[in-house]
């Protein structure tokens, strides 16, 4: 295992997939010459060239719309939105086009598209740039939503996302890029529909994902000092998660675990945060 | 063009007209739901454009798409079945009037959000550029779509990246009920392409021969690696924006005047005048279309509805 940052993990996933498959390319604002606003694609432009690392105008509808069109021709674009806040400028293309075209044309269209975008708040950027609208995207059938909380998950799930034939919102919390974690050195991918138990515990369940995983671990450490063992469930992906991930976790043979996790997930659902979990509760 | 091709184009135009006239009747009988935007009056535009394409050229259009579907090679049966929401429709009954596509025929829809398909068209062209094919994407849209941001983002990107795309605006004078003059800063739509450095032209969209000649020229220009081109086809829809349009925004006289420019009539006169065909041949085509349309209606009416399981089909590929 290598200990690398989330940024390096994401960068490695992109690099390896681009080396593996000529159809994979990157497009977005400042992904090329600049090297990525968060330096995720640093060095890509020099190595892969302008054809495969495309700088775009500040033009979110064109970025996502053109990525959809390119995906329809059989390419595998990884379109970057500089922040998730700008996804609203491309909302029609994300929810009305990427998510629905396959369904509406009777399965004729296939859209292997990854939309990478940093999200989250906590950086003194004001309300337009400090939000977590992740759950909104989970409301649209046809989209998959992935939001990893560890470098290992980020790399393995991004590789799977690029190989998937479905449109995927891949949301990276901007304050996690520097976080380090163990990542396998050999080639690996991870499923896009499986939550995982990050930490076992018998007294209480914390259901979380992305940045809040880090904080949940701190909370669990604190609780442990008080004699309370908190279990942490990391969702990692929440649409269409309900079709398989959670039941396995809920039914796991742990006294009281199933019901407790079920209640925790139900609470998330009622709160409107994770709407597509309804299938597993 | 050979005589056979001329007659085929006449057949296509008459078929679009007749299929849509029957569709209007079926709509009024409650057999077609949703919206129904008829292409009647504008047939020469898509017929001329699409007849000029090569098989590797992609087509994408807006919601007024039945004519384009027929020109792209989709059968009247599949079009009619889709209009009736039947499982045998070209989109399996899940798209309806505004969402017809046939990937096998390089026809990419049928898009109902005004202007939203323009960035997608840029992406189709990007796909061909990336893979070094010589395909050109033909993207059609109404004058109304040129006032929305998608249009401007897509044109800009197409020029910055020199994408192989033929932008075609069908200027039929109205975006729903609002005249071009009331909605667009310039009423000669092609001027908008100037701002993006995209070469452009205007053509009489009621004249199939003129549209075909323009399409031949501009597709060749794009195919030779010159980047995008913008064509404004001046045309007119004889029917309302959609079924149920009270048409308070225009006078009957105006419609009658434009009907003198009926694209089918103009082409018919041309074919006879140029001695390409005799009247009896054209009448025979019309009779054939009558039968074809009747068969399409019967096929659509007797086809099954999509099964309940279709609600959950085709949401995800994986």
Image (cartoon, coloured by chain):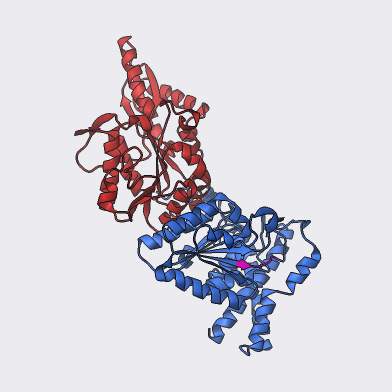
Q: What colour has chain A?
A: red
Q: Is residue B288 left or right of residue A6?
A: right
Magenta-highlighted residues: B233-237
B81 is within the stretch colored magenta: no
Q: Is residue B301 left or right of residue A2?
A: right
Q: Main secondary structure of the magenta part?
A: loop
Residue at image coords 25%, 30%: A181
As rendered, which of A33 and A267 lies closer to the eye? A33
Q: Position of residue B42 (x, y in %)?
A: 65, 68
Residue at image coords 64%, 54%: B185
* Chain shaded blue: B
Q: Does residue A202 show up? A: no
The image quadrant where one finds the N terminus of chain A is top left
Residue at image coords 42%, 21%: A260
Q: Position of residue B253 (x, y in %)?
A: 80, 67
Quick check: A256 above or below A196?
Answer: above
């Amino acid at each position: 295992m290598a200990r690398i940052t989330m940024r390096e993990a994401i960068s490695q996933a992109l690099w390896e997939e681009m080396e593996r498959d000529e159809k994979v390319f990157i497009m977005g604002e400042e992904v090329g010459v600049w090297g990525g606003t968060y330096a995720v694609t640093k060095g890509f432009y020099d190595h892969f060239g302008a054809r495969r690392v495309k700088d775009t105008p500040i033009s979110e509808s064109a970025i996502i719309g053109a990525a959809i069109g390119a995906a329809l021709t059989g390419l595998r674009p990884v379109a970057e939105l500089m922040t998730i806040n700008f996804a609203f400028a491309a909302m029609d293309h994300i929810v009305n086009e990427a998510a629905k075209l396959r369904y509406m044309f009777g399965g004729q269209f296939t859209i292997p598209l990854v939309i990478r975008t940093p999200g989250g708040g906590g950086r003194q950027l004001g309300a337009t740039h400090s939000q977590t609208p992740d759950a909104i995207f989970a409301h649209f059938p046809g989209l998959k939503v992935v939001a990893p909380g560890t470098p290992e998950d980020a790399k393995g799930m991004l590789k799977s996302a690029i190989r998937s034939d479905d449109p995927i919102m891949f949301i990276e919390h901007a304050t996690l890029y520097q976080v380090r974690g163990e990542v396998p050195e050999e080639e690996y991918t991870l499923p896009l529909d499986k939550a995982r138990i990050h930490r076992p515990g018998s007294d209480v369940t914390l259901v979380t994902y992305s940045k809040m995983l880090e904080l949940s671990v701190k909370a669990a450490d604190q609780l442990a000092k008080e004699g309370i063992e908190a279990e942490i469930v990391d969702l990692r992906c929440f649409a269409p998660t309900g079709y398989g991930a959670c039941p396995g976790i809920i039914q796991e043979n742990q006294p009281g675990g199933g019901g407790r996790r079920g209640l925790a997930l139900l609470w998330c659902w009622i709160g409107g945060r994770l709407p597509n979990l309804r299938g597993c509760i | 063009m050979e005589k056979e091709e001329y007659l085929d184009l006449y057949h296509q135009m008459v078929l679009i007209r007749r299929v849509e006239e029957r569709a209007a009747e079926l709509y009024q009988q409650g057999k077609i739901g949703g919206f129904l935007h008829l292409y009647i009056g504008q047939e020469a535009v898509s017929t001329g454009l699409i007849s000029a394409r090569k098989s590797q050229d992609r087509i994408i259009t807006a919601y007024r798409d039945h004519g384009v579907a027929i020109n792209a090679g989709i059968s009247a049966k599949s079009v009619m079945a889709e209009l009736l929401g039947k499982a045998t429709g070209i989109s399996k009954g899940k798209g309806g009037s505004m969402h017809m596509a046939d990937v096998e025929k390089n026809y990419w829809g049928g898009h109902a959000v005004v202007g939203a398909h323009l960035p997608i068209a840029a992406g189709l062209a990007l796909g061909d550029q990336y893979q070094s094919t010589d395909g050109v994407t033909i993207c059609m849209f109404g004058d109304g779509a040129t006032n929305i941001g998608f249009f401007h983002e897509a044109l800009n990107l197409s020029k910055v990246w020199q994408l192989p795309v033929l932008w075609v605006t069908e200027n039929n004078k109205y975006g729903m009920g609002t005249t071009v003059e009331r909605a667009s800063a310039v009423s000669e739509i092609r001027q908008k392409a100037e701002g993006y450095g995209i070469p452009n032209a205007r053509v009489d969209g009621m004249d199939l021969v003129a549209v075909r000649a323009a399409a031949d020229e501009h597709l060749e220009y794009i195919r030779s690696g010159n980047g995008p081109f913008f064509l404004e086809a001046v045309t007119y829809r004889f029917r309302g924006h959609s079924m149920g349009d009270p048409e308070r925004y225009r006078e009957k006289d105006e419609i009658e005047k434009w009907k003198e420019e009926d694209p089918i009539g103009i082409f018919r006169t041309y074919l006879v005048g140029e001695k390409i065909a005799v009247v009896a041949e054209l009448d025979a085509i019309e009779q054939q279309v009558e039968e074809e349309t009747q068969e399409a209606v019967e096929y659509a009416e007797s086809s099954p509805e999509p099964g309940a399981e279709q609600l959950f089909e085709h949401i995800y590929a994986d």
